Image: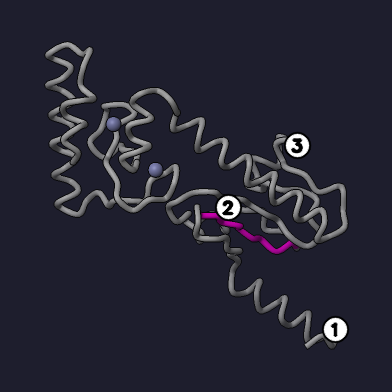
C-alpha cells in the first residue's frame, strides 16, 4: 500500500472521513496480503508495479490498480479513470472496424454504438462482419473469455473476442468448436 495514498492524497477531508478512509485502506492492504485481492496491471498503461486506488471509499475490495505515474495524475485530476478506460475501448473498436472493412472489403461494417443500440446489448461490438460476431476489449486485465463467449448470440456466426493489451499485442479468442469448424470448412473446400 502506497505511503503517498495515506499522506499526499488525504488533504481536504474531515478527521472522521480521513479515519474512515484509513480504515478501508488498512483492510485493502490486509486483503492483498491475505491473497483475497490480487494485483492487476495499471488499468491505463499496463505497468505491473501498481498501487491500489479507491475511486469511492465504499469497500476495501473496490479498487482501481494504477501505476505511480497514473495514480499521481488521477489525484491531480489530470486524467479520469472511467473516461480513459472508455476512450481506450472506443478507440480500439474504431481501429478494428477500419481493419475489418479492408480485410472483408465491406463498407457496411461498423460499431454497434453507431449502427444499432439493440445489438450492443447482445454483446456484439462490431456489426455486419460476415460469418463472425465480434466483441472488442482493450483492457490490461484478462477478460472472462468463457463467460463472454457464452453471453454472445448463439446463431450460425462464430463468436470471437478481440483483446488488446497495451504493448502486449492483440489476440482473437474463440471456442475450440468454432476453431474446429473453421478448419473443417477449409478442408472441405480443398484449401488445406
Ligand atoms: Zn499507468
Ligand atoms: Zn488513490
For mark 2, what is the residue? 151
Of mark 3 and mark 1, the one earlier in the sequence is 3
Q: List x then y, in percent, for residue 28.
A: 19, 40
Q: Quadrant of residue 171?
A: bottom right
Q: Are marks 3 and 1 in contact (CB under 8 Å)?
A: no
For mark 1, what is the residue? 189
Q: List x then y, in percent, for residue 95.
A: 69, 48
Q: What is the magenta range?
A: 157-165
User: Circle 2 sits in a helix, a strand or a loop, which is it?
Assistant: helix
> Looking at the rendering, in which quadrant would you find the C terminus?
bottom right
Neighbor class of circle 1 (other Cα within 10 Å; few <14, some 14-19, many 20+) is: few
Side of 147 where 47 appears, left or right: left
Q: Is residue 60 above or below residue 179?
A: above
User: Residue at left 80%, top 61%?
Assistant: 103
- Most distant residue in the front direction: 69
User: Circle 3 sits in a helix, a strand or a loop, which is it?
Assistant: loop
For mark 3, what is the residue? 116
Q: List x then y, in percent, for residue 147.
A: 50, 56
Q: Quick one: 64 or 168, which is closer to the camera?
A: 168
Amino acid at each position: 500500500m502506497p505511503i503517498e495514498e495515506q499522506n499526499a492524497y488525504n488533504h481536504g477531508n474531515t478527521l472522521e472521513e480521513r479515519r474512515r478512509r484509513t480504515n478501508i485502506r488498512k483492510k485493502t492492504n490486509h486483503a492483498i496480503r491475505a491473497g483475497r485481492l490480487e494485483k492487476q496491471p495499471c488499468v491505463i498503461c499496463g505497468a505491473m508495479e501498481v498501487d491500489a486506488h479507491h475511486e469511492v471509499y465504499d469497500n476495501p475490495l473496490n479498487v482501481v490498480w494504477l501505476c505511480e505515474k497514473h495514480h499521481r495524475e488521477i489525484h491531480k485530476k489530470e486524467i479520469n479513470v472511467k473516461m480513459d478506460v472508455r476512450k481506450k475501448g472506443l478507440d480500439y473498436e474504431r481501429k478494428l472496424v477500419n481493419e475489418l472493412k479492408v480485410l472483408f472489403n465491406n463498407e457496411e461494417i461498423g460499431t454497434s454504438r453507431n449502427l444499432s443500440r439493440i445489438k450492443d446489448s447482445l454483446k456484439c461490438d462490431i456489426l455486419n462482419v460476415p460469418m463472425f460476431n465480434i466483441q472488442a476489449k482493450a483492457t490490461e486485465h484478462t477478460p472472462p473469455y468463457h463467460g463472454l463467449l457464452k453471453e454472445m448470440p448463439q446463431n450460425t456466426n462464430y463468436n470471437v473476442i478481440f483483446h488488446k493489451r497495451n504493448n502486449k499485442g492483440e489476440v482473437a479468442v474463440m471456442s475450440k468448436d468454432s476453431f474446429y469448424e473453421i478448419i473443417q470448412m477449409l478442408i472441405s473446400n480443398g484449401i488445406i
